[in-house]
């Protein structure tokens, strides 16, 4: 259930798309100053979110708010920085009160467009009742990927760019989440996105990174 942290962040292991059902990592309370209410900003005021890092934590809150709204459910959510080392993202709680914890270094590096799909995946667990009890399994994780992708796309984010980003990460296989790159193929097939389109996005992201 772990993959390497993106190479530009650290080589330490952390879990990819990990939720309350699939991690045993304890949840640490964050200082009050790190807990903020969702903020609203218009997407049109921000530059293309596909490749660049987030402007700030407030932008990630805005993205999470857009994706939460796109679920069609009234989710009472919070976004907080998690622990390092720790998983990329995990959700704790139900629709009436949940918190998504995100890796503090990844919060500064991973593009907002990618976060939209990660948030979508995490919200899909309570919304679709996937893996909220017992151990996560690959079929539930794929369902969360697909439901989460629908939310993120409804909020205006680009699935091809997200899948391309995933392809730039090392492939990993686990009992709970399956193979990362196979998940990319399955999601792309489900939404009718050609592999060459995903690969082109991966190349664009790699080029962006190379110039930083
Ligand atoms: Zn999950």
Image (cartoon, rainbow, N blue to C red):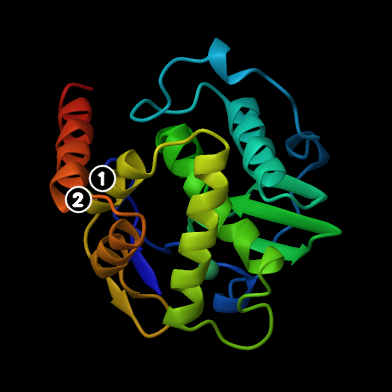
Instruction: Report which residue position mark 1 lands on.
Output: 164
Viewer-closest of 19 and 87: 19
Q: Going by the image, does 67 lie left or right of 1?
A: right
Q: Which of 37 and 116 is in front in this view?
A: 116
Question: Toward which corner of the image does residue 128 lie, by quadrant?
Answer: bottom right
50 in relation to 100, above or below: above
Residue hosting label 2: 194
Residue that appears at 40% across and 20% down: 48
Rendered location of residue 210, percent (x, y): 15, 28
Quadrant of residue 139 within the rendered picture: bottom left
Q: Is mark 1 on a helix, strand or loop?
A: helix
Q: Which of 21 and 6 is in front in this view?
A: 21
Q: Quadrant of the C terminus?
A: top left
Residue 162 in which image quadrant: top left
Residue 203: x %, y % from top left: 14, 37
Q: Distance between the residues labelled 2 and 1?
A: 11 Å
**Residue 44: image location, x then y, percent:** 55, 14
Most distant residue in the bottom direction: 134
Give the camera-side residue of 79 and 118: 118
At x 64%, y 17%, the residue is 42
Q: Are marks 2 and 1 in contact (CB under 8 Å)?
A: no
């Amino acid at each position: 259930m772990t993959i390497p942290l993106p190479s530009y962040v650290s080589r330490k292991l952390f879990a990819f798309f990990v939720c309350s059902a699939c991690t045993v990592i304890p949840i640490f309370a964050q200082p009050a100053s790190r807990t903020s209410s969702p903020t609203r900003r218009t997407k049109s005021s921000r530059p293309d979110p596909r490749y660049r890092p987030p402007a700030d934590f407030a932008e990630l809150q805005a993205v999470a708010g857009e994706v939460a709204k796109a679920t069609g459910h009234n989710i009472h959510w919070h976004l907080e920085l998690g622990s390092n080392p720790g998983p990329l993202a995990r959700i704790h709680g139900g629709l009436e009160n949940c918190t998504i914890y995100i890796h503090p270094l990844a919060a500064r590096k991973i593009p907002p467009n990618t976060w939209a799909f990660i948030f979508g995946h995490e919200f899909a667990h309570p919304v679709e009742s996937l893996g909220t009890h017992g151990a996560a399994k690959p079929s539930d994780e794929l369902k969360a990927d697909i439901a989460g992708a629908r939310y993120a796309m409804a909020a205006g984010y680009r699935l091809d760019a997200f899948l391309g980003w995933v392809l730039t990460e090392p492939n990993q296989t686990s009992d709970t989440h399956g193979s990362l790159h196979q998940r990319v193929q399955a999601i792309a097939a489900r939404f009718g996105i050609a592999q060459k389109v995903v690969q082109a996005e991966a190349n664009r992201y790699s080029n962006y990174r190379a110039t930083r």
